[in-house]
Amino acid sequence: MERVATTFRDDLERVGRWIDEYFAYPERFRVLPAVRPGEVIAALPESAPEAGESFDRIMDDFERIVVPATTHWNHPRFFAYFATSAAPAAIAAEALAATIDVKAMLWRTSPAATELEQVTMRWLAQLMGLPDGWTGIIYDTASVAGFTAMAAAREALDLGIRERGMSGRDVPALRIYITDQTHSHIEKAAIALGVGQANVVRVPCDAEFRMRPDALASRIRSDVAAGMRPMAIVATAGTTSTTSTDPVREIARIAREHRAWLHVDAAYAGVAAIVPEFRWLLDGIECADSLAVNPHKWMFVPMDCSALYLKDEASVRRAFRLTPEFILTGGENDVVNYMEYGIQLGRRFRALKLWFVLRSLGAEGIRAKLRQHIALAQEFASWVRGEPGWEVLAPHPLSAVCFRSTSVDNERLMEAVNDTGEIFISHTKIDGVYALRLAIGNLRTQREDVEAAWSVLRREAAKLEHAVV
Ligand SMILES: *Cc1c(COP(=O)(O)O)cnc(C)c1O
C-alpha cells in the first residue's frame, strides 16, 4: 500500500526523523557495507520512471537500497583515510542552501553568498592565525584549490602562457617540487596545466617524512643549471600518510631565492592551527603564497568545502579572469565576483554551512573537539606501544596513527577487521612496509569507540595467529 505524502512538510519530517535516528543509533549500521560490485545497479530499474512517484516510495528505496550499500563516513567508528563528519547545523544549512539555490558567480547573482564567503573566510583566517591581508576563497576540494594555486603559479612566471599557451613556442621545462609524501592532486594539476608528470620532482625526505631543504636547494640548482624553470614548491602541513609537516620557513627561503611559488597543502591538518598549542603547524605561513585547508575534513562541515588562502588574491584572477560581456554589470566595481577566481562559473553557496558550523560550535567547541581527537589518537598509540606483538611505525603528532602487528600479515588483518563491519580502518606504506592506519576525526567519536577499535584489532589478530594454516 502506497501512502501518499500530503505536504512537503510531512516529507521533511520523515527526513528529519531519519537523520535523527541515524545519528542516535549508529550501531545499526556496518561501517563498511557488505555489498558486492553491481548490487545497487541490479536493485534499480533499467529506466527512469515515466510517472512521478510518491516521496514515501522514494524514501523507502533510499532506506532499502542506498543506506545498506553506503560506506558510513559519518559513523563514529569510521577510522579510515581521514575521519570526517557533518555537524547537525551544517546539515540543516545544506538544505537551506539547496532551497535558495543561488549560483554564486557574481556579487549580483548572490550578494549574501558572496559576502558571507568573505566574512567566514576572514573568521577562519583569524582563528588559524593567518597574516592580515590574506584572502580566502572556497572551492569544492583541496584538489581544485591546489590546481588553482598551481595555475596562479604558472601565470606568475610571466611567460605569457595564459595568452599564447605552451606549445609551438619556446618555453623552458617548468618544474614543481614535492616529496613522495605529497598528495597526488599536485601531479594531476601538473598534467592538467601542461607542466607534465616528468616535471614533478620528488625531493627526498628526512627520517620523519619531512622535505629536506638541503636536497630541495641542490635539486633546484641543478635544474636551473640545466635551463629549467622552477615554477612551484608544494609543502605539506599534515601529510596524508603519516601527518608529517614540512619545514615551511626553510623551504620558503629557497622558494624566494628562485622566485618559485610556495603552496602549503594543509587540507587535513590546517584547521588544527585553531588550537593554540598546534599553531606551529602553520609556522612560516607568512612566507608562502598560498594555503589549502579543508573545513570538510576535520572541521565538521559536510563535503564539500575547501578554503584556498592567497597572499595576493589578484594572482588567481590574473590566471582566470575572463568576464564575458553579457555578464558584466555596471557600477559594481568594488565587489567580489567569484567566477573570476577559477574555472567554474556557477558556484554553490558553501559559506552557509561553514557559517552555521562556526556559530553553532563556536571556536571553543571546535578546539575542544580537535583536542579530544588528538588526545584519543595519542592514547591509542600508547596502547599499541604497550602491547607485545604490536608497534607504532611513525611519529603521530595529530589524530592519525600508523602501526602494525608484528605477528600476523597486516593486509589480511585489515581485511578481517573491516569485514566485521564494526570499524573501518585503512592502510599506507611506510618505507615500503605495509602499515595499518587509524584516523580519528568524527564529531561523535568517543573513547569507547577507539577502545572498540583496539579490541577488534587484537581479537582479529589473535584469530589469524591461531588459525589453522
Ligand atoms: C585529503 C587531502 C587532500 C585532498 O583533499 P580533497 O578535498 O579531497 O581534494 C589533499 N591534500 C592533503 C594533505 C589531504 O589530506
Image (spheres, rainbow, N blue to C red):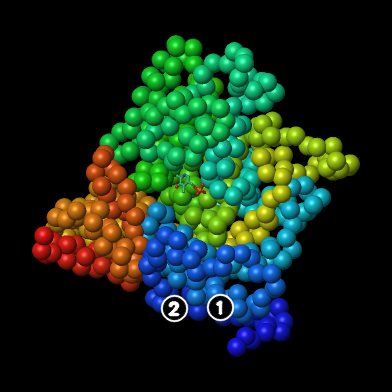
Task: Tell me what residue is drawn at x 60 percent, y 88 percent.
Answer: 1
Instruction: Please say if the residues under marks 2 and 1 sit with CB atoms less than 8 Å apart.
Output: no
- Mark 1 neighbour density, 10 Å: few (under 14) some (14–19) many (20 or more): few
Which residue is the site of mark 2?
25
Residue 238, quarter of picture: top left
User: Which three-letter amino acid code belongs to the residue tagged 1?
Assistant: Asp
Task: Tell me what residue is drawn at x 60 percent, y 74 percent.
Answer: 58
Q: In the rendered structure, which disc, 2 or 1, sits on the residue that comes first in sequence?
A: 2
Residue 250, quarter of picture: top left
Which residue is the site of mark 1?
60
User: Which three-letter amino acid code belongs to the residue tagged 2?
Assistant: Tyr
Q: Residue 232, can we see it? A: yes
Residue at the extreme front: 46
Side of 403 relative to 112 (left or right):
left
Residue 304, quarter of picture: bottom right
Side of 394 relative to 374 (left or right):
left
Secondary structure beneath label 2 = loop
Secondary structure beneath label 1 = helix
- Mark 2 neighbour density, 10 Å: few (under 14) some (14–19) many (20 or more): few
| Front disc: 2 or 1 | 1
